[in-house]
Image (cartoon, coloured by chain):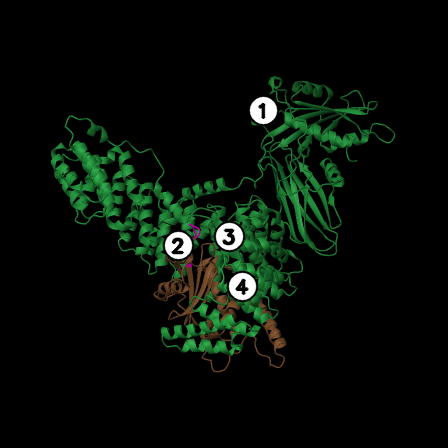
Chain colours: A brown, B green
Amino acid sequence: MIHSVIIFNTSGVPRLTKFYTPIHQSSQTLVRKIYSLISTRSAGLCNFLDAPELEDFLGRRDEDEKLRVVYRSYATLHFVFVVDSSESELGILDLIQVFVESLDRAFENVCELDLVFHFDEVHHILAEIIQGGLVLETNLEAIDSSLQQAAQARKHSFASANPLALGVGGVGPRSSGLQTPLGWLTGKLTGVGPR
Amino acid sequence: MATNMRGLTQFIADIRGARVRDLEEKRINKEMANIRKKFKDGNLDGYQKKKYVAKVLYTYILGYKVDVGHMEAVNLISSYKYSEKQIGYLAVTLLMHENSDFLRLVVNSIRKDLDDNNEIHNCLALHAIANVGGTEMAEALCEDVHRLLISPTSQSMVKKKAALTLLRMYRKHPDVIPAAEWALRIVAIMDDRDLGVVLCVTTLVMALAQDHLEPFAVCYQKAVDRLFRLVVEHEYSATYAYYKVPSPWLQVKLLRLLQYYPPAEDPAIRSTLHQVLETIMNNSAEQSRNMQHNNAQRAVLFEAIGLAIHLDTNSPLVSTSAVLLARFISSKETNVRYLGLDTLAHLAARADSLEAIKKHQGTVINSLRDRDISVRRRALDLLYSMCDVDNSEVIVGELLRYLKVADYALREEMVLKIAILTEKYASSYRWYVDTILELISSAGDHVGDEVWYRVVQIVTNTEDLQAYAARVVFQRLKSPASHESLVKVGGYVLGEYGHLIANEEGHSPIEQLHVLHTKSQFCAAPTRALLLSTYIKWVNVFPEIKPQLINIFERYRHVLDSELQQRACEFYALASRPDEDELLQNVCEEIPPFPPRESALVGRMNKKHGATEDKRTWVHGGKEANLDREATKQGRVPTGDAPPTASPTATGDRDVMASLQGLDLSGPSNGTSATNGAAKTVTPTTPIKPSTSTHLAAGPNVDRWFEKLTYTNEGVLYEDVQIQVGVKSRYQGHIGQLAIYMGNKISAPLTSFTTKVDVDDPEALSVTFAKMPPTLIAPRSQSQQILHIECKKFFRTPPTISISFLAGAHQTISLRLPIVLTKFFEHVTLGQAEFFERWKLIGGPPREAQSVFPMHLTSQNEIDREKQRNVVLGYRLNVLADVDPNPNNIVGAGVLHMSVDGKVGCLMRLEPNREAKLCRVTVRSTSEEVAGEVQRLIQKPLSVDAAS
């Protein structure tokens, strides 16, 4: 099971935190702890980390649940999944890739700012991939179509409430003035591959 | 969309603009105060509520504690506008947890959304339950979620979420899910066309099957079938290919699911699975340039290797895997090295022979010095698992050397592992003592109490070791810095066995005292207390240093620690008694050996890694560790699930009859031992035990069809408006072949078609599919499945076949297969004289079964001789002419063939009486069970209350 999904940038500022099991301490300390574990690891080390240190934070209920941190870094962002032994490590790496690719689709060249200003949408995207700590869908097309449906419904409800408004809403275009794209995140995967 | 709310955008921009944290906090506090006020004033419209809740959420995501907005979130959920509802649900899943009181307020809104016709509302509700649902929600909403999962009108999107939501409910409150009852229905969805649905349902099945292996057993063949279609036949929609690998997540899940079950018996399933694993391993041979592709490919490969190891550690597949893994552990990619070591540890934990792994010992030891702590951890685990008597000194030596430079995070675990390995594979006691003391000296703080307790136990129980141990401890204590644990061991060992070395140069009592007592000032109170006990023992054995010792006790009488003070006072009093007093001697008697007990170390280790029904299918350590674990697991399995296999034969009787069992009727007659057979009478009929998991289809027709097929080779076994099941069979000796024809009578396909055969006693009868059964039957068409049957021993209960399928609703039909004992009979021809010779030889009860029953007459009130003859022939007994002078009587003979228990002869006489409308059947056989069974079978279709 996936216990938490956390995205933070290279200076440790959280951009998304989602906990599928209740945590026992403030999420800020947890993020800081994970950040300190990961930021010290140079590129080229593996993407997995045993994390006995985190067990206090996540409140181990079972004695035998060994938690592992699986992370991947893209441009300025670290995507961190805390999982237990029932998940395949490489499978989680693939899942992070799927998550990033879905973000990319939804935001057309996702950048860190998108995650800041559209945090709700990021959560909705995550909700289409992982539900309650379990993998829900991995097919980009299917994820996209569920998101489209939700966007349609939102648009619809917005339009019915404001008959005079021009069609606003939906996923995609950023509002002007906020565009400082960092480029394709998917192309910016750092710290992997043979060295 | 957040950006539709200008206030929110401004808020976010402000926070981003805050240069220092103080400013950020200030801005947030201001905003929170504002929101609190707005909420208090009330009178907000939906848009405003949405906006403020969104601000609260953003604050929450930044990591601040928020205490407002819960109530507004609850209100938003029941909004009819999707945009508000969505934010409301997001707030519920983020701000609340399963024990929040607020959740009670949303149960009704959630139920309403579950029942809504709009599936995106269903999805929001399901997602909320899956994230925050607790016991209460599980109780209230379980039925609704289940309905969404199985309803034929549910969209894939809804089914997926419903499956995972159900799983969440099961985890939180297992009692609300009647897992066994829903098993077939849920497993049927594994045949869904949408791989997303299959993935989610497989996840659900994995969790349920762990606790309910038996009811979910049919998922095994579903999983194998699905893997075959994905991996070998490439049957999947293109969008589910992830970098050209067909849904690696699903493959991994299915491969993992298969590891929960013992290897399948059915040869068809085994060979299919073998083919799947082989293909996966071959696929991995070709490396591609694309990293993502390789990643996905290997995710599947590692799981496949795990399964191969689970199935059979001696198979060629595992040898191939070992070669692959060896290559992986020296790979350039860190991830691959990591997983390679991890999987090798799995292999080492299961394999009978460690030879293949030992070849790479050097590489593994080098991995202890990898740059990456994650890899070092895995290398440590692997070394622990691959250690045995031959390489223990090398491995433990390496570990000890590495311990000195190891990461602090690793040390405690290392110490435990070293201690266990040293004890388990010690080649000599000296080596054991040396190593453990070295361990205690070098790893000090990381040595748990269990470690030194164990040393003491072993030294006490091993007489040869005591002097040596005392000497070594003494030497170690002489070094200026000794760890407290070492002082404890020293105190104990020298106290008990110091006198053994007291005459040696440099080990005199006063020197021993000196070495130990100089350490005492650096030790905590419990250790000092232990040292005091050492001193009192010395008072007994070393009278020459008694004054010094008494002096020490004297001083300790005034320390503040009550435990130390009490000991000192008591010991002082004891030591001050006159020399001839025997009390001291008695008190300080040498410690008797400890009763042999299991090492507490291993217990601690297992506690660390656990052995409950978590998803791990193995633990680190050697093969035995895993066997132990299996055993404890077996013991824990609730007995209710597995049907107890009733053995229809009482072995005691069988032994007596063993000499006669192979009696071939055409051979020379055997001795007379047949007459003194066991006295047990055979119960003429045994009620057919229904299989525990399924209910047999019933009805007069079903019985009639079955009955008829017990003495004919082909015909209808079952029929209703949707499906027809026909049977054709052939038997030769103990082998048979049965073809089942399943006809779909409706104009829609029967999907999720599942067939499963249950045999009561697999030791006696084996029934296997020739190949994997199909999962779909096209409209108005027929599918054929071949069953191979082998009779090994006597059996009574016919096997059952369970057929389930989806045709709108989910249907399950369980039928008895017409496989009865007589099917394995072969004709025997005997003349009159021979017949009666054997008849008499076998004798009366218990090897005779006889009954008289009302007989069915023809419409002319005549004996139905034709039918009687056909029935006897149908039960594969040869009808012998010219044996009985009465033409109405029928005499039959046959030999039962069994592959394990050999052949059993059987003679039968059928004597109808027209006037009385009664018929008498007498069966004699060298096996009393066979006689009873044949008599029961023949009587059935002939008696008047037979269905026809």
For the N terminus of chain B, the quadrant is bottom right
The mark closer to the camera, 2 or 3, is 3
The mark closer to the camera, 2 or 4, is 4
Q: CA distance from mark 2 to mark 1?
A: 55 Å
Q: Quarter-wise, where is residue B689 in the image?
A: top right
- Give left or right: position of B351 versus B405: right
Q: Which residue is mark 3?
A: B256
Q: Which residue is mark 1?
A: B653
**Secondary structure category for the residue under label 1:** helix
Q: CA distance from mark 4 to mark 3?
A: 18 Å
- Label 2 amino acid? Leu
Mark 4 on the same chain as mark 1: no
Image position of B310 with respect to A152: above or below: above
Q: Which residue is mark 4?
A: A138
Indicate which disc residue B341 carries.
Answer: 2
Start-end of magenta stretch: A61-68
Q: Quarter-wise, where is residue B339 in the image?
A: bottom left
- Label 3 amino acid? Arg
Give the x, y percent position of residue B846: 65, 21
Q: Neighbour class for label 2 at 10 Å: few (<14), some, many (≥20)? A: many
Give the x, y percent position of residue B420: 33, 44
- Label 4 amino acid? Thr
Mark 3 on the same chain as mark 1: yes
**Secondary structure category for the residue under label 3:** helix
